[in-house]
Amino acid sequence: MNALELRAALALASVYVLRMMGLFMVMPVLAVAAMDYPDYSPLLVGLAVGGYGLTQAALQIPMGMMSDKWGRKPVILLGLAVFAIGSFVAANADSMAMMIVGRILQGAGAIAGAIMALATDVSRESQRAKVLAIIGIAIGFSFYLAVILGPLIANSYGLAGVFGITGILAILCMPLVKWVVPNGVQLSSGDTLPQKDQLKRLVFSSQLWRLNISVMILHMMITLLFVQLPVTLLNFDMTLDSHWTVYLPVLGASIVGLIVMMGAARGRTPKSLLITGVVLMGGAFLALSLEDNSWWWVTAAVVLFFTGFNYLEANFPALVSSIAPAGQKGTAMGLYASFQFFGAFLGGVISGLVTDIWSQELAYGIGAASTLVWLFIIFGVKEVSRVKRVMMHGQFNDTDIDVIEGQLMSVPGVLEVTLNTESNAVYLKVNRDFDAVKAKDVLTA
């Protein structure tokens, strides 16, 4: 990477870390800290934990499309401003109802697609994977950091402090976007952002719908866990400020488990390991649903949960990328993200409602039972080889499409071809045998 690409990658990764930390820091503390509000109830806690997911799911695709029309930076700055406003509304809330309004506003700042598109705009094709990898690592890092820092900040400054710091972090992101991230040439975004005319076809794709439902259940379960787990830890006389002493070793042990599973995968995504991840999460919820658990029992269950969660969270996007047709990855990932955030909302609602009416143990039990449905869905996922996506440009019109597609398909390593005559963009799915020189020769002939 050159200096410009490195600057862009680090600045956009910092924006992601600061923003996602704000969303995640609340999760391990809200269920306990919210008990001080006059209208406290488990249902409202569930809505507060998962409320951001509803607006994120609804606006993820529209805001990505808006960035094509308005520009990347204006949409990102707008999203950060809305996110900051929601944070300050939640920080000043004197009731659970108002906090939920703040959380829903936080979710309305749905800028993930625009950030990824901007990263694409400011990087060369040969370096784009590295830039996106840095941002991806930042997303995972932000989750682990937030889960540990959240209880510590809440203990010192309360829930209002967590939300207040979140709003300040969002504001600090704005100068980074405005002045540190370089301006790039806005590229054709078929493989980066959703396209309206592709949505219907990909929603009903025989393989992609299984991954969309899978990530919905995955994030339903992580939200369900964080509505319940902080309260479970209170049963062991652990104050909120000491909860990080559980989360830190648990996350560390689960990372070791993730490394073991990734090593067993050997660069692939075998179905057997996807099933293993689901079974680990289901077993963890089943263990947590049993009454009179010991501290060690709960800790072991949460390690199993995060081992499975980490593996699936890391591998589902790669599967979507491999399965999505050439030139349609942006739409596929937009749908995937929408299902992911809706799952967070669903988990909060289900967990809160079940606890409100019945019991915490039943909420855990529903999480375990949902994995049975999930296993049925996962069994239908086909194993695919990892592929690389390449975007090229050429001069052609509608009458040339069939000829050029045929010539490109004969190039070694080319698996799929999609041509966009409006932007003269050529989208390819290729394997390691791809001959880029021959592909360029076809387009320049």
Image: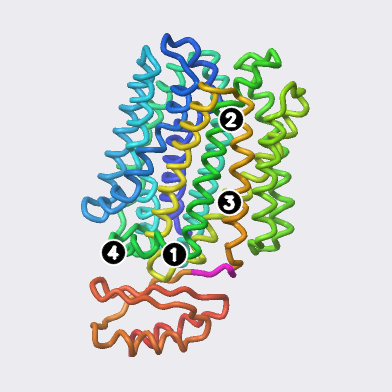
Pick whichever, 54 or 116, lies toward us: 54
Q: CA distance from mark 3 to mark 1?
A: 21 Å
Coordinates of residue 340 in the picture (x, y in percent): 46, 46
Of the numbered discs in the image, which one, if any, rests on residue 363? 2
Q: Amino acid at mark 2?
A: Ala
Of labels 3 and 4, the one closer to you? 4
Pick whichever, 144 or 382, lies toward us: 382
Of labels 3 and 1, the one closer to you? 1
Of labels 3 and 2, the one closer to you? 2
Q: Which residue is mark 4?
A: 197
Mark 1 falls on what kind of element?
Answer: loop
| Residue at left offset 44%, top offset 48% | 339
| Residue at left offset 64%, top offset 55% | 274
Residue count near mark 4 (Cα–Cα under 10 Å), binned few <14, some 14–19, many ≥20: few
Mark 4 falls on what kind of element?
Answer: helix
Q: Which residue is mark 3?
A: 314
Q: Is residue 387 magenta?
A: yes
417 versus 53 height, above or below: below
Q: CA distance from mark 2 to mark 4?
A: 39 Å
Residue count near mark 2 (Cα–Cα under 10 Å), binned few <14, some 14–19, many ≥20: many
Q: Amino acid at mark 4?
A: Asp
| Residue at left offset 33%, top offset 64% | 198
| Residue at left offset 37%, top offset 32% | 170
